[in-house]
Image (cartoon, grey):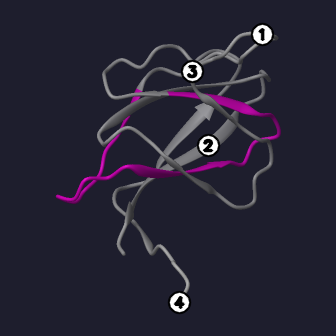
Amino acid sequence: MSNTSVLRTAGQTVALSVTNTSHASVTINDNTNDQVNFASFLNTGAAPVAVQMTNYTPAPAAVFPVDGTSSGGFVLPAGMTTPIVLAVPTSPFYMTAISNSATASIIYVTPINDQS
């Protein structure tokens, strides 16, 4: 028997318009009484976006990692057609994002819960 996780949305989707200046900290929250530890991320823009998440507010400014250093977050590729689901701090969590382009990229973040 295969081991399959059933995922369901657990809150409203938040859209962030991200440029080459770190976006102000935003709250990602669920609308369930379950513990929510996952979120779906989708970057529809033409440039990669670095994301920083924390369980306290405000989240620190997002930065891209440079050679030999880490950013403490992760980078979403440009032009995504399918969202990725990642483990996140228990909701509510707080996040910032930055693009490497002055042209705005829109990213969508949705709290996700494991139903299985």
For residue 2, which quarter of the picture? bottom right
Q: Which residue is mark 1?
A: 68
Q: Which residue is mark 2?
A: 107
Q: Real-space Cα distance between discs 2 and 1?
A: 27 Å
Tell whether position 48 is magenta.
yes
SS for dot 4: loop
- Mark 4, Cα crowd under 10 Å, few <14 / some 14-19 / many 20+, is few
Q: Which residue is mark 3?
A: 72
- Report the disc number at residue 1: 4
Hey, what amino acid is under mark 2?
Ile
Q: Real-space Cα distance between discs 3 and 2?
A: 19 Å
Q: Real-space Cα distance between discs 1 and 3?
A: 13 Å
SS for dot 3: loop
Identify which residue is drawn at 47% across, 51% down: 39
- Of the pair 29 and 71, the residue shown nearer to us: 71
Residues tagged 3 and 2 counted as in contact (Cβ below 8 A): no
Q: Earlier in the sequence, mark 1 or mark 4?
A: 4
Hey, what amino acid is under mark 1?
Gly
For the record, the magenta segment spans: 26-52
Up-down relation of residue 9 to residue 111 (above or below): below
